[in-house]
Image: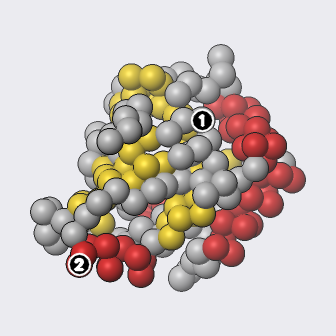
Amino acid sequence: MGCCGSLWVSMGSVVLYGFLWVPMGPALRERLSRSAAVFAAFVSPEEGAALLRDAEEALRRRRYEDGHWDGAISGFREAERSRWGAAGAAVLQRMSCAFPPARPPLPHSHILDLAPHGCVRPHIDSTKFCGCTIAGVSLLSAAVMRLRSVRDPREWAELLLEPLSLYGPIEPHRAPQRPIEPHRAP
């Protein structure tokens, strides 16, 4: 069984995703531009394939689950990995250089594979499990991530997560909402 539609690898202080800004208010755009960056095609197709092989190896005995301990995810399987092949380790090192963590990164990477019906509901990532920097690369498909301010829920931005692109870091007071839907052009 291979990975399904959406796969993310998150590394202790760095989570593997990608993105494009969608229209938003000027105040939010200003704050987000100081706290987040996008690198298109950050991962080469060859590196993406190597990461996927490593991720599939870690996930091979895992079954898709419908419930997560915090209720934030359904239709998923996940694993942690502390050792990667040469290509994967090089990508994770570049990610750490792109977004230097305020504290040392966690020793493991978090791998999340969503089934076609899977979704990630609105939540606030825990620094205990994610580390102090949240960033990522989407390996298999495009998705839309909505970031909503915890302080003012009227402030939000939608990000297009393109495969093999890097985004991050996300401010701790932003609540990632990751509705996993096929991208629809405006």
| Position of residue 34 measured from the top left corner of the image (x, y, whole percent) | 41, 81
Q: Is mark 1 on a helix, strand or loop?
A: loop
Q: Going 60% across and 54% down the picture, which residue do you hit?
A: 165
Type of amino acid at the residue the image marks with label 2: Ala
Mark closer to the chain start, 2 or 1 = 2
Q: Mark 2 — residue?
A: 27
- Can residue 18 be seen from the camera position used here? yes
Q: Check the image and report above or below for 91 versus 142.
A: below
Label 2 vs label 1: CA separation?
33 Å
Query: Of the numbered discs in the image, which one, if any, rests on residue 114?
Result: none
Q: Going 68% across and 75% down the picture, which residue do you hit?
A: 97
Q: Check the image and report above or below for 106 versus 162.
A: below
Q: Mark 1 — residue?
A: 140
Q: Check the image and report above or below for 38 versus 183.
A: below
| Position of residue 8 measured from the top left corner of the image (x, y, whole percent) | 55, 44
Q: In which quarter of the image is residue 79?
A: top right
Q: Between residues 154 and 55, which one lies in front from this camera angle?
A: 154
Q: Residue furthest right?
A: 86
Query: How did the renderer colour the structure?
Result: secondary structure
